[in-house]
Amino acid sequence: MKVHAVWMAFFMVILWNGSQARMSEQSNSVAQEEKELAKMALDILNHDSTEFKIELNKEFIGRLTALLERPESYDHPFKEMETVSRLAPDDDSFRIFTWYLVDKQAGAYYAEDAHYYFGLVQRKHIDPSGKEHILVIPLLEIDRLPRNFEQVVTDNYAWFGSLYYGAKFGSSIAAYDGYYYKLVPKDGGVEEDENEKELVVTFTPGKVQGRMLKESNKLTYRNHERVKESVRYYTLMGWNGWDNKGNYKVLEIMSFDPEDSSRVIFGAPIIYFDQIPKARALFKYSDFGHFTMNTGYVKWGLFNLFRKKMVVYDHLAPPEYARPTDKWELGPDGSYDALTYYPKYGGYFEWHRDVEIADDFENKQHKKEMQALQMEYAAQDSATFPDYGELMRGRAARKQRKRQRKVLKQQQKAAERRLRESGIEFD
């Protein structure tokens, strides 16, 4: 078991005597402040003293939190902080920052080669009145890993610490619109019955143990009924170095609490390896193994004539000559498995064993993207060949503005609908 109690104190520094720090940061531009934070981030990862890294990380959390609370920071790319992962979905509704420190000190300050993870979610939220807010939500690493953790839905105060990385194909963070069921009090029923607390669940997917549940097939209990709620799921791929014996990779399902804008929900029981759904896919593998997990194209359909994008990963197996009495960690065996998303029944992922990767299709996709890029080059009204980086940044900026307009329009419509429901009419 890893020791995490000290990390609760880390995020208390978000509320530390921040007046002096915030006054000083407001006088600096976002770019200037980022340069200073980038130097701190390098030391947090690479410095020899664990005690020094811990103290430096406390200051880093406070300063980065204060910086992300500034509205002008939302569109800043933060490319200077190379040791901090920064990912965002296509809908531009949030960004997630993750980083870690490792105890490499002789004698081990906490545990030998133990990794500790930290994160912040910067969220753009529009309240019912239509006013936009920038929220910064801390992620606190879970203090211990329960046996059934793959089945547990948690929140940002019990986070499986990970350094998240972007997808090879598609958006860095994929988004899926689905629905789930929750239990609510019936008309005239009590808010919560002491004997039924265990039944009042937050997330139950549309597909449960192989049974396809329709909206009309609501399960009812004595004081509660099952109702359907829409949700947007985000999928994150992450790595956790854990210790000197094993590592983890995780496919995490993330969403936002519809009633609490500052609460991030991790996990949703929509991943099916068998009849019982898991809230996340967690893979532990040997420190000597090279386990890969990312999006890829898989041969699919009749005679493998089609191609389908999935989350592809190495199949883990014990060593070939392992004895029952030996202690060992799993490692790749040369074959591949995959998880693919199906939008029906509220949305769920399903496992596929021993898939065949379509390398030729991936190469075709790359060629197609390069051809489109060359067409953009040719369309430039300039005698000089444009810089590749500038061209790609321009494309990304145009896409981001388009997504922002779309999201803002959707949020405004939702705000107007809520106001109408409260009795306010629009001309």
Image (cartoon, rainbow, N blue to C red):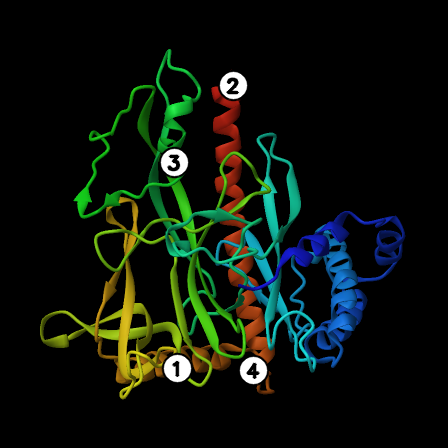
Gap between marks 3 and 4, in whole Å? 50 Å
Name the residue beneath numbered marker 3.
201
Q: Position of residue 408 (x, y in %)?
A: 54, 44
Q: Which residue is mark 4?
A: 388
- Name the mark on residue 371: 1
The residue lying furthest to the left in this view is 303
Mark-to-mark CA distance, 1 and 2: 52 Å
User: Could you tell me if residue 314 is visible in this image?
Assistant: yes
Q: Residue at x 59, y 79 (%)?
A: 389
Counting residues from the start of the chain, the first of labels 1 and 3 encountered is 3
Quarter occupied by residue 391: bottom right
Circle 4: residue type: Tyr
Number of marks in the rendered image: 4
Count residues near mark 1 (Cα–Cα under 10 Å), then give few for <14, some for 14-19, many for 20+. Answer: few
For mark 3, does the 10 Å Cα neighbourhood hold few (<14), some (14 to 19), or many (20 or more) residues? few
User: Which residue does the numbered mark 2 point to in the structure image?
Assistant: 422
